Each structure stands twice: as structure tokens, then as C-alpha cells.
Image (cartoon, helix red, strand yellow):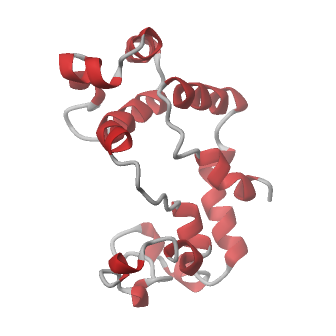
């Protein structure tokens, strides 16, 4: 669960505005209804993500997509995608330093932070745990919801082929 109150998609699927603007096809409405009733936790989290980002995906067409996997493996190349006028807000000295508030701060991870193969193995774990059926379902959800700026499997394809 994202928070103590449950998934955030539920109020959205009961909003006339959201239905009209973002669930504007029978396939999208049926997808939400089916996942709400029969979906896995992963599928419900995808709906949460969609509801949080649907407006931005629809309104902002001039965006840059940065992938977390690429930020970890090759941060400089990924950051070069950001327009120069926004780079002044970034502290590039913090790259390759794990957060002080996460398990990534542990000594083992810190000692291997420069090891690209270790990073690949670490990043690949969640994708390796997904079954082919789960991956197909995620792709189907993305297709129905017309999410075409982000494909986790595309971003991680080099990770899962270790």
C-alpha cells in the first residue's frame, strides 16, 4: 500500500471528471473495474501511478524522461538530457552517493558504488522476480492506458540479460 489509507486510484475511478478526461474509453473503465476487483497488488500500484501522473502525461508534451536505471548506471549521460537552464538546480557532487536514509547507505553497497556490474545485478532483481505473465499484464495495462513514455522493461532490458 502506498499509504495507511489504501490505494489512491479508488477515488479517481469514482470521479466524473477523471472518468471523462482520463478513462474515456470502455477498455480503460473496464481495466480499472477489473483490477479493483480481481487485480494483484502490483496491478493496483500501476493504477496508483497512472492516477498520480495522468494529468501530466496528457498536458505536458515537452518533457524529458529520465530512467532511474540509467541514472544509477550512467548518471552523467542521463543528466545531459536535462535542458541546460535546469542544470543549475542540480548538485552534481551528490552523484554516486547513496542516500543516508536507505539501505543503500550500508557499507556493502557503499563499497561497491563504483562497480557497474554490481549495480546492474542490484537493479535487475525486481525485474527478475516478475513472471512472464506479470510482464505481459503490465504491458497490456500500459497499452490500454496509453502509457507510451515509460516502459520499465525497455529501460531495464540490459539489466535482465546479465
- 41 or 85: nearer the viewer: 85
State the quadrant of the N terminus: top left
Visible residue check, residue 111: yes
- Residue at the front extreme of this rendering: 62
| Relative height, residue 79 to residue 149 (above, below) | below
- 28 or 11: nearer the viewer: 28
State the quadrant of the C terminus: bottom right
- Residue at the right extreme of this rendering: 162
Residue 158 is left or right of residue 95, and the answer is: right
Residue 134 is left or right of residue 79, and the answer is: right
Horizontal and vertical percent position of residue 141: 53, 26
Count of labels shown? 0
Name the residue: 57% across, 62% down: 69
Residue 55 is left or right of residue 116, and the answer is: left
| Relative height, residue 120 to residue 148 (above, below) | below
Horizontal and vertical percent position of residue 93: 41, 90
Name the residue: 46% across, 83% down: 95
Horizontal and vertical percent position of residue 72: 55, 71
| Relative height, residue 114 to residue 142 (above, below) | below
Name the residue: 62% across, 63% down: 122
Question: Which of the 4 image quadrants contains residue 133?
Answer: top right
Visible residue check, residue 15: no
Name the residue: 80% across, 54% down: 161
Amino acid at each position: 500500500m502506498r499509504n495507511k489509507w489504501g490505494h489512491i486510484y479508488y477515488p479517481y475511478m469514482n470521479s466524473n471528471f477523471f472518468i471523462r478526461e482520463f478513462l474515456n474509453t470502455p477498455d480503460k473503465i473496464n481495466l480499472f473495474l477489473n483490477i479493483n476487483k480481481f487485480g494483484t497488488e502490483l496491478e493496483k500500484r500501476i493504477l496508483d501511478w497512472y492516477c498520480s501522473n495522468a494529468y501530466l502525461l496528457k498536458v505536458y508534451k515537452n518533457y524529458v524522461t529520465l530512467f532511474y536505471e540509467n541514472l544509477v548506471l550512467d548518471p552523467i549521460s542521463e543528466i545531459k538530457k536535462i535542458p541546460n537552464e535546469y542544470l543549475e538546480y542540480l548538485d552534481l557532487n551528490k552523484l554516486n552517493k547513496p542516500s543516508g536514509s536507505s539501505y543503500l547507505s550500508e557499507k556493502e553497497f557503499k563499497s561497491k558504488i563504483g562497480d557497474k556490474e554490481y549495480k546492474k545485478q542490484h537493479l535487475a532483481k525486481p525485474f527478475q522476480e516478475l513472471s512472464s505473465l506479470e510482464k505481459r499484464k503490465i504491458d497490456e495495462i500500459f497499452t490500454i492506458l496509453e502509457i507510451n513514455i515509460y516502459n520499465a522493461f525497455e529501460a531495464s532490458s540490459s539489466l535482465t540479460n546479465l
